[in-house]
Image: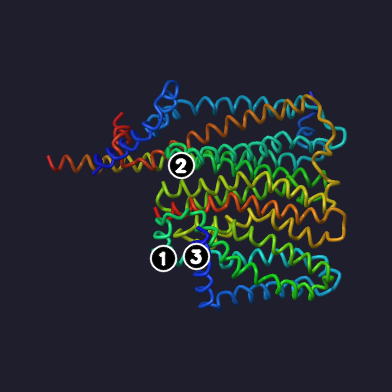
Amino acid sequence: MQWSSLEAFVAMGGYGPYVWGSYGVTLLVMAAEVVTLARRHHAIRRLIDLRASLTETEHEEQA
Amino acid sequence: MLDFFVRLVRRDLLLAWRRRADVLTTLAFYVVVVTLFPLGIGAEPQLLHAVAAGVLWVCALLASLLSLHRMFAADHADGTLEQLLLSPQPPTLLVLGKVAAHWLTTGAPLLPVAAVLGLQFDLEQSALGVLCLSLALGTPSLSLLGAVGAALTLGTRGGGLLLGLLVLPLCAPVLIFGAGAVSGWGNPGAEANLLLMGAYLLAAAAFCPWAAATGLRIAVE
Amino acid sequence: MNGAAGGRSALADHNNDGLSMSGQGKLLYRFASPQAFYPLAGALWPWFAAAAMVLGMAGLYIGFLVAPTDAQQGDAYRIIFIHVPAAWMSMFIYIIMAAWAGLGLVLNTRLSSMMASALAPTGAMFTFVALWTGALWGKPTWGAWWVWDARLTSELLLLFLYLGFMALHGAIDDPRRADKAAAVIALVGVVNVPIIYFSVQWWNTLHQGASVSMTAAPKMARIMLWGMLVMALSFWGYAIAATLVRVRSIILERERHSEWVARLRAA
């Protein structure tokens, strides 16, 4: 084990802000990408569903 | 084939001559932007001497970018481009003709102007010669790379800005070798910059016409 | 109207498939149509995402708990466990993106071009991460947030190339035209990347910045190398999963008028 205590781990030998700033931002942009991906997929699925339900009601009205 | 090329360049030069103001605008832009630098960074001769090569080269890059969007736009708008692409002549030749005309109307006129501006930046006589030589070798590469960007952005939204984003990063090697040749002149190995620029020009001349021709075909599809 | 559009795209698929139909090429070409690839990508991406998670945990474990503190750089060096893999990914993804785009340009296969546009944002993201972590590593190590080091500078130019690819694709309304135009700029870019890297390094040695170079880092311990490799594999998993999910969205967006997408909903 490298670290004597949690504080030592967080401090990173005095380089805490640099190390956690790197890892934090990396995690943040990855999470942001995941969220945009999920949103994009849901948006297009909803659009397709909406279109389909519209055409279905049209068919019903015609019948 | 050569006849086609010559006629194409002559036609474009004639068109440029009838719109001389455009060519002069590019030159005026170059002079104005270069002039702004001493105002921005201060007029100490030593400082100006140190940044001269970089400033003159970056501004040349911007000046040649300025007229790029016109390279194919008029011919695209009036349908001439489609006719030229349908002709039995290879489209790469068409691109080379356009590039030659662009260089003759924007790249070449920059050379004497750059020499004069170099004097204002306290460059020595020998460095002025190298500056002109490096611009003579480098600006054709810029026109070739620019042709690719101009062809690909034909008829797109926000063409001008996009063109800059596409072309400028690709121009980095030309800028590095060009400015390096001038500022490093006299140091051992500085001539290598000019050789590298020549090599880059040859590679660009081999690859860019193909890419630009593909871009033109996509645009008129 | 739906049926007609669907019929047309099915015909286009057929034409593409007809290009080469011999032996083992068959299986590959079966998945070359967006319609066939959509469910395959849907089945595959959770595995890559899971692999990315597990490997990421392992990489963090090695990077923070196993690898010792560096004698010269202290704990600041732990940034390389993401910096170096992100820089690798940014370059790999650009090359793969250009390969897919070129394939789409030459063979006129729609899926290849969709893969290229699906890769671009993830590649740009890794380029940004490489730049960001490079700056945060540079500050304590070199004393400056940004040095015009050859690698950082070429990485910045690479980010511009990614942005140019995406901007050009976004500026053209017709998706097939956008695919082809973006493919040309990707190919021009991929030819230029080594030249840019060489020229920037050349410029760097000329301007005596070479004294601060990442190659000057002390010889790396084996465990540090392992940490970087595991992290790189995790990033690979993440990139593949993100690309597959994005390509699924792109397929739906482009084929939303076709019949198979409408049937997708019923199922």
Q: Is residue C45 above or below residue B83?
A: above
Q: Are marks 3 and 2 on the same chain?
A: no
Picture disc at residue A39: 2
What secondary structure is found at the residue carrying circle 3?
helix
> Quick one: label 1, few (<14), some, or many (20+) residues within 10 Å?
few
The percent position of residue C72, horizontal first and vertical second, equals 87, 36
Q: Is residue C28 above or below residue B128?
A: above
Quadrant assignment, res A15: top right
Q: CA distance from mark 1 to mark 2?
A: 39 Å
Q: Residue at x 50, y 42 (%)?
A: C117
**Direction from residue C206 to residue C182 in the image, left or right:** left
Q: Amino acid at mark 1?
A: Ala
Q: C221 and B123: which one is in front?
A: B123
Q: CA distance from mark 1 to mark 3?
A: 17 Å
Q: Residue at x 58, y 25 (%)?
A: C51
Q: Residue at x 73, y 62 (%)?
A: B134
The percent position of residue C164, horizontal first and vertical second, equals 56, 52
Picture disc at residue B8: 3
Task: For the residues labelled 3 and 2, say whether their Cβ atoms are less than 8 Å apart.
Answer: no
What secondary structure is found at the residue carrying circle 1?
helix
Picture disc at residue B77: 1
**Direction from residue C196 to residue B6 in the image, left or right:** left
- Any part of residue B61 in sight: yes
The percent position of residue B66, horizontal first and vertical second, equals 58, 67
First in sequence: mark 1 or mark 3? 3
**Direction from residue C106 to residue A60 in the image, left or right:** left
Task: For the residues labelled 1 and 2, say whether their Cβ atoms are less than 8 Å apart.
Answer: no
Q: Amino acid at mark 2?
A: Arg
Given this view, does label 1 or label 2 mark the residue nearer the observer?
A: 1
Q: Are marks 1 and 2 on the same chain?
A: no
